[in-house]
Image (cartoon, grey):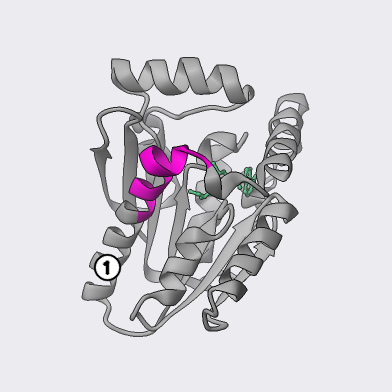
Amino acid sequence: MSEAHREPNARSLEMKSRARQQFEAWSGTYDRSILHHFLFRPSYAAALTEIGRWHAEHPRPFRVLDVGCGTGTLTGLLAASPWPVEAVGMDYSPGMCVQAAAKVARAGLPCSARFVAGDSEHLPFADGAFDVVTCSNSFHHYPHQDAVVREMRRVLGPGGRLVLIDGFRDNIVGWVTFDVLINWVENAVHHATWQQVHRYFADAGFRSIRRRKINFWLPLLVTVGDA
Ligand SMILES: C[S@@+](CC[C@H](N)C(=O)[O-])C[C@H]1O[C@@H](n2cnc3c(N)ncnc32)[C@H](O)[C@@H]1O
């Protein structure tokens, strides 16, 4: 059986069910969370920087998939950018997708942004459908993280790029924040070490894997790899 199509077990079912419940309940007020100041906005900025670097190397129209897009802020920022981009946001919570679509419609953004409900482990897209895949602050909810990175690799075309951003738990500040506090609040989540993330990328066939840490408090790990 391929990594991307594993049988669910009790732990994976619990992680997914908790994630869906948590984000369905949060979808209506998510955009007002204080975490946007400290966690989510710095992540969007880091993702846009990486996408800008990719586009400077590949100056042509391109397609971006944001996995675990939440209320679609990053997808909306892309649609509003001067880049010739088609942006798709995908999320496991249908409520998040509804909020995202409404937000983009309210902003009067062009139809170059759309949203799809789905599971990161089974991306509902063809092989090579995207040039860039992003994923910010969502990866710790995935029970089979290696399988998800393989799926992300599958939907990237040649020369494509994956930008993965999640809590950095490899120093004392990050360990207390993510392994202790966030684990306690969210339960049934897993923040991978930078070595684990590197291994997922390498095993999925990514090249030129690099990483950087951003933020002192609430530190984030930005990992980038080329398809
Ligand atoms: C903390 S929010 C981050 C949202 C957005 N990326 C941002 O930075 O604002 C985590 C998101 O991951 C989504 N999620 C959790 N498990 C998922 C899965 N298996 N597949 C796709 N999305 C998932 C949740 O529904 C939620 O919207």
Asked if residue 41 is among those painted magenta in the image, a careful observer would answer yes
Looking at this view, is 49 or 132 the one in front?
Answer: 49
Q: Amino acid under label 1?
A: Gly
Residue 21 lies, in percent from the top left, at 75, 37
Label tally: 1
Q: Which residues are magenta?
A: 33-44
Residue 7, above or below 78: above
Mark 1 — residue? 52
| Quadrant of residue 24 within the rendered picture | top right
Residue 48 in percent (x, y) is at 33, 61
The secondary element bearing badge 1 is classed as helix
Answer with left or right where residue 140 lies relative to residue 21: left
**Is residue 18 shown to the viewer in this render?**
yes
Q: Residue at x 53, y 81 (%)?
A: 112
Q: Main secondary structure of the magenta part?
A: helix
User: Going by the image, does 181 lie left or right of 68?
Assistant: left
